[in-house]
Amino acid sequence: MRFSFIHAADLHIDSPLAGLGLKDKAVAERFARAGRRAVEALVAETIASEAAFLIIAGDVFDGDWKDVGTGLFFVRAISALHRAGIPVYIVKGNHDADSVMSRDLPYPETVHVFPSNKAVTQLLESQRVALHGRSFPHRLTNDFVQTYPARREGWLNIGVLHTSLDGTRGHEGYAPCSVSDLKSFGYDYWALGHIHAAEIVSRDPWIVFPGNLQGRSVRETGPKGAMRVTVEDGRIVDVTPLAFDGARWAHLEIDVGDIDNEADVLARIDAALMDAHGAAESRPLAARVTLRGTTPLHNRLVARREELRDELRAGGFRIAEDCWIEQLKIRTTAPQDTTVADADALDIDAMLREAAADPDFAATLEQLIKDIEDKLPKDLRDELRKSDVLASLSDDARALLAGART
Ligand SMILES: [Mn+2]
């Protein structure tokens, strides 16, 4: 007997795409619909491939619904699976934990949501599959996987679990457990969720993060989707990623170290953007461009960053109407000899040193950075704290001043 099932997680339905900076309403709408289109693509492929069932390993929703339309959209999408006779197995994650959601809507009876008070086993007799799972009662959950049931002999055993695993992937406190904890259960497949980067953690047994369904910022680049798992005679023989995302993010890190004129820089970015757009297979594309390398253009690139970004955005439309530059970062460096000030020029470095030594100036700057920090979501705030903001501000100020004089 041969069949396949689909393993998805982290749908985060109606969570907005962050940091696009889109001014054009029509293009903004195409990006805004990406998350829902990804859910529709997941459902369509589950039906078209005649999958035996669909697993969603947590975080269907990004949090409590802003309006009931979010819930109704999901019920409409999974009801198509009900009509096609395909069961769905869901655990709730930290984002849609019982205590987080103030309301819910009735699902068709072929949609099984695991309870949060204990782990239970759902049996799918026709395929002899035993699915073990438990929903998050609260946002943070410990001592969780230990409550999962023992394997069933003679059945294909699947654990459905929302977890940060051992915490090495940047999250902690969400049903933490180790790979050896999971292996000790003797299940055939662990259908995990929570970590947004897809990863096959182990092949014996299979321990798999499918990643999230739709990248939501430039921190979630590349194809996004779910896993197709193929079973033959009670054994898993193949796990293949499927792309369902409705828009694609890319981060193009481009070395311009060997270039000394701006037109060639633009041409190189254009070529990289063409490649990324091709790889996105006609999806809307949002690309961050980071320029690196040592070039005499450095000061000029820093001084002209915003104009360059706008020119690049204009150029992107030649490729496609939704080929968009999310941000342009100048991370180039100036060659040593151009920073030597001649006698007549302002000594920019001395001025910056003087400003940095002024306690009033330092206090103003600190306050400014703190104000920005307070407005940021937690993960970005941590990132900001890790970076040396003052040093990079002073580098940019130096390049801006020098670039303005050339
Ligand atoms: Mn999560």
Image: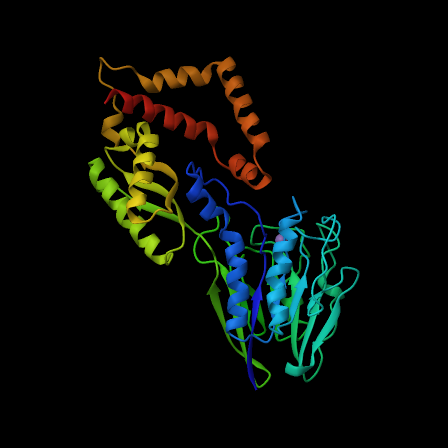
Residue 81 locus on image (x, y percent): 60, 68
| Residue 117 spot, x, y in % from top left | 79, 60
Q: Is residue 190 left or right of residue 285?
A: right
Q: Where is the N terminus found, in terms of image quarters? A: bottom right
Which residue is depicted at the point 24% across and 33% down?
A: 297
Figure disc tally: 0
Q: In the rendered view, would you say 361 is above or below 226?
A: above
318 relative to 60 in the view: left or right: left
Residue 166 can be seen in this image: no
Q: Which quadrant holds the C terminus?
A: top left
What colouring does the structure picture have? Answer: rainbow
Instruction: Tell which residue pokes out farthest to the right in this image.
Output: 117
Image spot of residue 158 (x, y percent)? 65, 72
Q: Is 339 situated above or below 122?
A: above
Q: Residue at 57% across / 47% down in the picture?
A: 15
**Drawn side of residue 168 relative to residue 93, left or right:** left
Name the one closer to the observer, 293 or 404.
404
Q: Quadrant of residue 187?
A: bottom right
Q: Is residue 329 above or below residue 154?
A: above
**For this rendering, which residue is in front, 271 or 366?**
271
What residue is drawn where x is 55% and y is 65%? Answer: 43
Relative to 1, does residue 140 appear above or below in the rendering?
above
Q: Residue 237, image x and y in percent?
A: 52, 79
| Residue 144 seen anywhere in this rendered image of the structure | yes
